[in-house]
């Protein structure tokens, strides 16, 4: 028995070696035979289905004046004027001095200034006027006439806006008298002397007139007249501007610790830290759009409520609301005081 096994073992091993590749191939996953058998059970799904692309998270973007909800102000301007008017492309800090132009109402009740084409310089174009006392007075006085405007250009997301510093309404000139109707005095005619001129130059007459003009303190009629004048209602000084609850326009703020928050309209506002709630400077100030705001909002969107600044700037007022034009905004490091303390 042992001899037979020893004699047949090489043959069996040879047969097993020849059959092993086929057997192993049948057992390998993903072989052609297994794929064919799987397709008979479950047909392969086609590749004509629409892939589902990954979604990107929503990014918070600051509202740009004139570019928020509704039609774009520049498109409305071109439709109103029935001509193509390009936007201003001046660098921030440029000054517009006594530029003649027209005013057009924007979709958001703002005013757009369109400089006159003949006086327009390189880079000048249509700009939105930023809120200020000067703009408030201009809106109250303007009734469709042309204007001469001076101000400073501010840039926000590649859009120019104008902060008005001075303006003058252009009145229609009165018709001049034709040259044919102008009569020049005849040189042959001698000027006639006014007979009253000589009397008024008399010193005695002048003294008499001064005595007549000087009120008599002993005259009882003077007291009655004064009482009647004081009893008349007095007309208050004309002030078309609306009183603001915040600091008055022109107030300079120097190195004030503050944070940035969104107001009800979605615009960025500055809230100062450690202020007395009863103080006028404790109110939030809406930040005017400018390059400084672009840098501040980027840091605030990255850091959230932890973003703190040392802010310096100038306050402007418009229709009862206060605005801040930041000049310097320095980042502050982390603090152990949170925003609710």
Image (cartoon, helix red, strand yellow):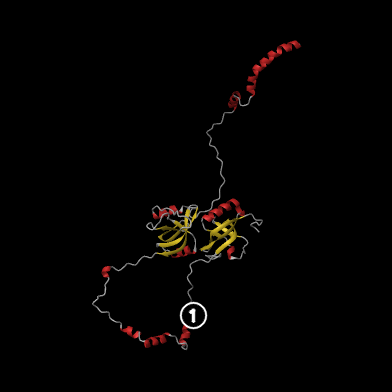
- Left/right placement of residue 289 relative to residue 196 reads right
Q: Residue furthest right?
A: 1
Instruction: Assign a secondary structure to mark 1.
Output: helix
Q: Is residue 109 visible?
A: no
Neighbours of disc 1 within 10 Å: few (<14), some (14-19), many (20+): few
| Residue 226 position (above or below residue 133) | below
- Tell whether 201 sits left or right of 188: right
Q: Nearer the viewer, residue 295 or 38?
A: 295
**In which quadrant will I find the N terminus?**
top right
Q: Quadrant of residue 176?
A: bottom left
- Determine the residue located farthest toward the left in the rendered image: 188
For this rendering, which residue is in front, 131 or 161? 161
Estimate the x, y position of residue 291 in percent, counting from the top left. 52, 55
Q: Residue at x 39, y 55 (%)?
A: 81
Nearer to the camera, 100 or 136: 100
- Residue 158: percent from the left, percent from the top? 48, 52
Whether residue 55 sits left or right of residue 185 in the image: it is right
* Residue 256 visible in the picture: yes
The residue lying toward the viewer, choosing from 168 and 244, is 168
44 up-or-down from 287: above or below: above
Residue 313 to residue 30: above or below: below
- The residue under label 1 is 230
Image spot of residue 30 (x, y percent): 61, 26
Q: Quadrant of the C terminus?
A: bottom right
Tally of numbered tags: 1
Instruction: Name the quadrant containing residue 169.
Output: bottom left
Spot occupied by residue 217 in the image (x, y as percentages of width and height): 47, 87
Judge from the rendering whether residue 318 lies leftward or rightward of residue 189; answer left or right: right
């Amino acid at each position: 028995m042992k001899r037979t096994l020893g004699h047949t073992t090489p043959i069996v091993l040879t047969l097993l070696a020849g059959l092993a590749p086929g057997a192993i191939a049948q057992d390998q996953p993903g072989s052609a035979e297994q794929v064919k058998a799987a397709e008979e059970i479950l047909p392969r799904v086609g590749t004509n289905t629409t892939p589902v692309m990954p979604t990107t998270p929503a990014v918070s973007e600051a509202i740009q004046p004139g570019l928020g909800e509704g039609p774009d102000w520049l498109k409305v301007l071109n439709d109103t004027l029935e001509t193509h008017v390009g936007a201003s492309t001046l660098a921030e800090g440029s000054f517009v001095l006594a530029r003649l132009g027209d005013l057009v109402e924007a979709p958001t009740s703002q005013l757009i200034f369109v400089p006159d084409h003949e006086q327009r310089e390189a880079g000048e174009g249509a700009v939105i006027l930023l809120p200020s006392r000067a703009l408030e007075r201009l809106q109250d006085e303007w009734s469709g006439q042309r204007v001469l405007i001076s101000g400073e250009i501010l840039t926000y997301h590649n859009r120019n806006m104008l902060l008005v510093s001075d303006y003058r309404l252009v009145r229609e000139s009165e018709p001049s008298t034709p040259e044919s109707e102008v009569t020049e005095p005849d040189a042959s005619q001698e000027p006639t002397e006014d007979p009253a001129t000589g009397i008024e130059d008399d010193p005695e007459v002048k003294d008499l007139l001064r005595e007549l003009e000087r009120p008599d303190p002993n005259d009882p009629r003077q007291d009655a007249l004064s009482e009647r004048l004081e009893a008349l209602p007095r007309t208050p000084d004309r002030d078309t501007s609306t009183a603001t609850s915040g600091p008055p326009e022109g107030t300079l703020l120097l190195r004030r610790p503050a944070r940035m928050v969104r107001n009800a309209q979605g615009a960025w506002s500055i809230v100062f830290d450690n202020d007395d709630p009863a103080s006028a400077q404790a109110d939030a100030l809406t930040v005017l759009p400018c390059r400084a705001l672009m840098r501040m909002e980027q840091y605030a969107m990255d850091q959230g409520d932890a973003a703190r600044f040392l802010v310096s700037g100038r306050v402007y007022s418009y229709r009862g609301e206060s605005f801040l034009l930041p000049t310097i905004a320095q980042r502050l490091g982390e603090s152990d005081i949170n925003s609710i303390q």
